[in-house]
Image (spheres, rainbow, N blue to C red):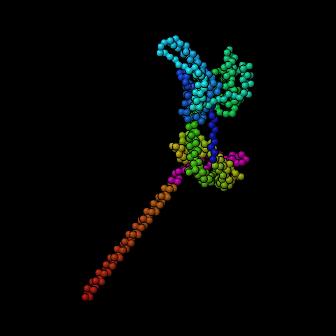
Amino acid sequence: LVLRKDFMKNYIILDTNILYRSSFGDYSQFRFPTTYDDIKGKIERHDLVEQFEVLVSSITINELFQQQVEAFEKDYKTLIDTYRPCEPVYGVELTIDPNFNYRIYLEGRKESYIKANDIAILPICNESRFGFIVNRALNKNAPFGGKKGGADKGFKDAVIWESILEFAASNPGHYILISDDRQFQPLIREFTETTGQDIKIIIKDDITYLDSRIEELSNEKSIKNKLDNVYNRLVDDDEDIFNKYIEHLLGNQLEKMDINNLPCEVIDSEIKKEIIGLNEVGEELFKFKIRGNLTVDKFAPKVIVEIDNVITTAQNMYIQSIQVEQIEANLATGESLRITFEDKIFYPYEQGSEQEQGSEQEQGSEQEQGSEQEQGSEQEQGSEQEQGSEQEQGSEQEQGSEQEQGS
């Protein structure tokens, strides 16, 4: 049995300026700002971890690391400079290990944070792509903006962009780049032509697009879960509903039908056991298709059919009934046929229940009849015994009277 599905992953890439921190409240830890946690939290709350992956480029992580090291060194120098005037005062003492290396310390914290939070890293592109980066710089193509003093930033943006292109080429999906750098906007067409994928580039203030995308996929997942539940109900080995429905079609629905207004009998039939296009079409209503071939008495050689079926469900995707909605048919030559048929609804549970009830009623009736017959037989036997006893008593009385008279 085959259920056809098509779900593509969504990759969210966060640029350095989205994760930039203007201040640090705790130099003992390395962590991303709350923006990262907010995005991951929304994805997890909607149970969409398999549909989304948040990527941070290794260049961005290194930039954030360097930013924190420089901020620490600056604040450390300020601390020392502030302490010097206080040093002569008795009781005020500042102890600093002269051998302490903050860069090494923070490197360990960074690796622990990445591992503990399962950070997905966008790797730096291969060296073979650096020729493209040089050409971008020489021609001042995006993301090189040509602004004075922006060469370093343009180079890092270019490396990130080439890394995205390389990653997307081997990882099909929908891409969302969140960056406040407008230099990426002109590159959307290049991304589509180079990778064959689609990308949406948004700034931090337009994060509502991401919210709507998460909400959209959350609804899609809800539908997918419903489809999975209905599908599993159909093919469950214990209930075997799908195979029973096929038997119902072959034994009841497809025995006789009108084809092009001609009453026809089906001589032979073959239905493929494949569930095609299962989809939700309404509240507690689902549709799927099945295909097969029919051999009928008035058309040759075979009639090719595609049968649309409607499932009615209740709570927990309990399947109440399945029925044929329409049958599309044509000959091998391509000629279309018009089929009309008697509507016969398949009830996977109620049919068996009715049969069992009927059987129980019949058994009960037979038992009652048998009981009545036994009672009647006992009553007759009792009546006969009473009559016999009365006859014997009468005979004895007559004999006794005769003997008295003779005496």
Q: Nearer the viewer, residue 236 or 21?
A: 21
Say whether residue 274 is magenta: no
Query: In which quadrant of the rendered image does the C terminus lie?
Result: bottom left
User: Where's residue 346, x and y in %?
Assistant: 56, 50
Quadrant in the rendering for residue 155: top right
Seen in the picture, residue 382 relative to 346 is either above or below; the reply is below
User: Where's residue 318, x and y in %?
Assistant: 53, 45
User: Where's residue 193, x and y in %?
Assistant: 71, 29
Task: Identify the residue at image location x=68%, y=24%.
Answer: 159
Task: Identify the residue at image location x=51%, y=43%.
Answer: 315
User: Does any portion of residue 268 appear in the rendered image?
Assistant: yes
Magenta highlight range: 324-353
Q: Nearer the viewer, residue 35 or 384?
A: 35
User: Where's residue 120, x and y in %?
Assistant: 62, 31
Task: Identify the residue at image location x=58%, y=27%.
Answer: 109
Say whether residue 343 is magenta: yes
Q: Nearer the viewer, residue 63 or 358?
A: 63
Q: Is residue 286 left or right of residue 89?
A: right
